[in-house]
Image: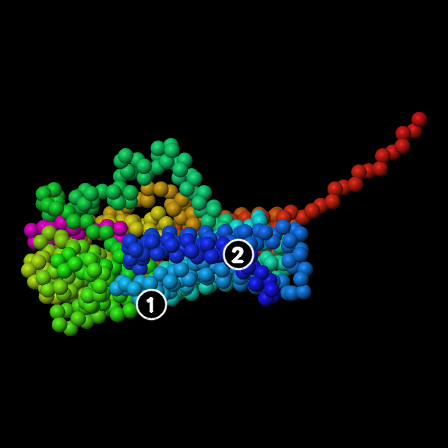
Amino acid sequence: MIDLFKGELLRFRLWAAIAAFANVAVLGFMSRIVDLAQQPILVYQVFAAVYALAGIALGLYQMGSYRKPNHWLNLLHRPLHRLRIAGALTGAGTLLLLVAVALPIALVALYQETMTARVVDLRHWLLPIAGWLIAVSGYLAGAYTMVGNRRYSFAAFLLPNLFMYSQASGVAMLGVQVVAIGFLALLFAIAFKPDPAAPSRNPAAVLAVALPVQVGAYFLLWMLGFGVELLWTVSGTHPLNMPVPPKGGYIEADRAEGKDMLLMGIAGSRDPEAALWREQIALSDVYTRYPLRNLPRRGEMTNLQPMEFTDGERNINWVFTHDRMRFVGYGTLDKRARGELGVGEETQLAFPAPTMPFAADYLYNAHAAYQYDDGQGRIYERIRLPQGEVMASPPEPAGDNLLVLSDRAAYFYPGREATNGLDLLQPLMRVPMPDQVGKLSRMDVVELLDGYLISYTYTWGVWSGELQHPYQQVLRVDGKGQAREVARRALSIDVPSLYTNRNTWLSPVLRVICLGAQDLFAAKDPLRAKPEPMPAPVLWLAAACCLLSLLGAVWLSGKQAHSPRGRWAWVLLCGVVGLPALVSLWLMYPRRDTLPLAAPDSQPVVA
């Protein structure tokens, strides 16, 4: 086993050295231009994709070279257990990726830590591990694709895709990566045998192999909907591509200007002041707010956006550090350290959560909003949300006042005090939110003579099937902060419900599994809303698909080689999971070979 391990290292040592050198060169060059630790999430995703592709290429080539019949027999006919042989090969591959991927990232982080004044937190030291694990997951997916049955082993590539949709962050994200690698290693161990094409007889192994195949079939069937949508677009009847969207639908609500949205909201109102509101809307400015979908979390390895701002008068760049929960400064010209910056003029307290800039001299985090005073070079807390609420939209002007949106309410703060002072502001009024902020797509506000007219439009999640009943609600808020509903209208879903909910009726079980995998190890997000219950027609269609899958499994399994117990287990699984399980049954088991019937003996011809 050790000799095989060493042989693989020697075999790929040159390629690993070249990849490591190229990685160091690219990272080193970019670190001279920008601060790699403060890039937006897209940059991290590009590097992650490159590392995953490098791992996939190694797995495909390494196992592809052994997968030739003669080489495969020579490899497995050794005085070693098959899993020890597999461990030697994959152990060498993971070590090579450690050198090519993790080591260069660690060297660049060490350079920034020791040779520059840039911020390097503990979360940045996790990046070499994360990059290595991503490469290893791609490597195992590629290795399994070459070793396993070619009819379905490609489904393993879906597991590394989980990292793009996972809601976990920081160390929890590393846990998600370890789980994916463990599952891929299990698949590889199951397939690494003298006849990889032969189905396993162990029920647990069969279920483990079938799960990614079913998820892959589920994803491909779901993707077929975009082909239908493309034809829909070409025909010119797609609601998203119409010059004028359908009236009363959620597409119209998402595209409308603020004034039009308010006017549509109160069009059917019988309130005696409705005519006056229409006149005021036509003459006044309407302020539209779109709620945040994510907040920075402590310890996350990526950034929603660079967590830094620049003091132009002092030529200082302030960068937020998660370790000390303060801003660390360095000169924009000489790149030397300039100390730390906390909250307050004297106390310099640590921030309660990761804080990022959002406008000139303003910053925010999940709990509060702050202002940086250029004259004093200090940060002051201006707005503090009540305990238990988180920021859904940082403060921005709404008429003469400031509007802040939390996950539970809208707050109005005095604009004059915000402009003329640096003290902590007290809200003029608090307007409770009618529904969950995770469903809110936009909020339109117009200032009246004695209060506000506020429109809430709840359409977020319609396209993904998480919201089934979009609507618009308009509130009249008087000068004392008392709110009353003046209009409410249901918005139609402009595309068929069966199309937006195809991720459910294709397989309710797999939808639950995918959502669970997405939330694995993730903390609760107050800015997300739970999916609403499915309409009855969708549930009936899901039941019909499961029944169709069960009947199809009865017919298909009869033409395949199964034990009686195995056959009916598959029939039951197809009935529970749905059509993706039937596709996996077809892919995983070929049709049973049948012998041709013997021709009847020919009778001699009697003269």
Residue situated in front as seen by the camera: 152 or 138: 138
Residue 268 part of the magenta segment: no
Q: Position of residue 577 (x, y in %)?
A: 51, 54
Which image quarter holds the N terminus?
Answer: bottom right
Residue 32 visible? The answer is yes
Q: Quadrant of residue 418?
A: bottom left
Residue situated in front as seen by the camera: 492 or 103: 103
Residue located beneath label 1 in the image: 122
Which amino acid type is marked by label 1? Leu
Q: Residue visible at 15% across and 56% down?
A: 312
Which amino acid type is marked by label 2? Phe
Q: Are marks 1 and 2 in contact (CB under 8 Å)?
A: no
Report helix, strand or loop for mark 1.
helix
Mark number for residue 5? none
Question: In the current view of this chain or complex, which residue is farthest to the top?
Answer: 607
What's drawn in magenta, residue-wise? 439-455
Residue 367 visible? The answer is no
Residue located beneath label 2 in the image: 12
